[in-house]
Image: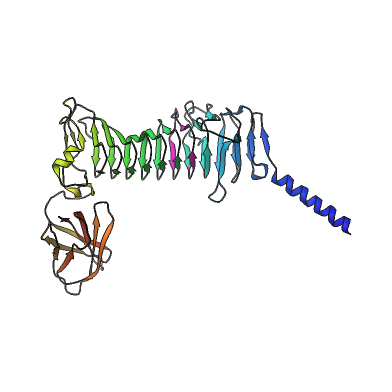
Amino acid sequence: MKHILSLSFIVVLVCCCNKLTAQTTINSSIYSSTTWTAAGSPYIITSNIVVFEGATLTIDPGVVVEFGDGIIVDFRGILIANGTQSAPITITSNNANPVRGIYGGFKVTGYVGQVGDITNQITLNYCNVSYAQEFMNLGMSAQGPFNFTNCTFNNNTYVNANGADYGAINYDHCTFESNHQALNGGDTHLTYCNFVNNENGAVSVATADHCTFSGNTQIAVFAYTSLTNCEVYNNNIGVQWDGHASTTMTGNYIHDNTIGVEIFRFWNEQGIVFNYNKICHNTTWNVQYDFSFNADLSQNCWCSLDSVYIRSTIRDGYVNAAYGLVSYSFNDTSCVQGSNNNNNNSSSNSGNNNSGSNNSITVSASPNPFNNYSVIQFDYCDMCSYQLVIVNELGKTVRTYNDVSGSSLTVEKNELPTGLYFYNLSKGNGTIAKGKLLIQ
């Protein structure tokens, strides 16, 4: 009986050990559709291979793919790599001491069907990629769109440095960290992506929306069509921008970079949109203007009401006559889309009350500017209950007054530092009025 138990234990142990040490060596090309499964993981690619036209390589969740030094996979077929949040796919080096660029990556050179057909040749979801020379070279590809979702790219020389011949390259909810150059060129579109501590972040991409760029040591972002709703901070050059017809830069917060925005050109053409950006506290220049034509940046804000100070943060023709002149406004509410851009101390807006009908209310603050206190006055409303929220120039809430009734409210300075503040008076879920306070 003891011998039987011992034998059973050995069989189980051997099976477990085999399972723990399972791996698959890839040293020959792929001619027909193939699936790499978790049971065969890791897949170690030891020689340059081709995935031929007509073949689809599917990589299952949880699979680890390891490249030998210098190895390139030539893709003429289709790649589908769909990991999950709990079981991402890992693509990395097989070297025990990997460094940036130690293996080649994927070179997409073939065509599937007719040139320009929409075939989604490359699809990655929940993939973690590291140590490639150029992870995805799309320079000779023509079968987009190429879609990357929920992926993390770190310690690569390039993630993608060549745009596709045909088809958009889409990155959604991806993170790029500690790469030499994350993205460069192509019909590349970014949504909800993070670029952290790269040398160059996203350069010569088409669009970027709701993205964050921080700690990039050279250029954070240059989007040649549109840059919208992004935060760009603690970079060397935050934003490079080339203003020509149909280019848009709006709703961005660009702060604490060495240079906030470097503008190459600003043509006097219809369709240029550069507004509602908050450009503040950049150490050398908020704006470095490099073109000979004048530029109107009046619908932006600069975290200051001091016109002389704002002018000192803009490098234009007043600094070097080779460049044109930049015009601006110094009403700090100009970065809020829909602002009426006036510079008085009262506001009149309409909002929704609890029943959904519109109210109109006039609000004023006096004294304003103030040293000790300011009284905010508004139209009396019997049985009304308001909420007043005060935020600083960075958008951080510093005071909240609930259940405000009557026709006035006294705001004490107390611990608030000098500076510009914005208040929002609301009733129910609707904003009734907005205004600004200046503490001296």
Rendered view: 75 above or below 195:
above
- State the residue at coordinates (20%, 63%): 414
Residue 150 is inside the magenta segment: yes
Q: Residue furthest bottom?
A: 383
Q: Which quadrant: the N terminus?
A: bottom right
Q: Which quadrant: the C terminus?
A: bottom left
What x and y, as percent, mark residue 262? 27, 33
Which of these two is toward me, 331 or 419? 419
Which of these two is toward me, 70 or 125? 70
| Bounds of the magenta segment | 149-172
- State the residue at coordinates (45%, 38%): 178
**In the picture, residue 408 is in which quadrant?**
bottom left
**In the picture, residue 424 is in which quadrant?**
bottom left
Which of these two is toward me, 54 or 347? 347
Residue 216 is inside the magenta segment: no
What x and y, as percent, mark residue 329? 16, 43
**In the picture, residue 41 is in which quadrant?**
top right
Residue 282 seen in this snapshot: yes
Answer left or right for 336 relative to 367.
right
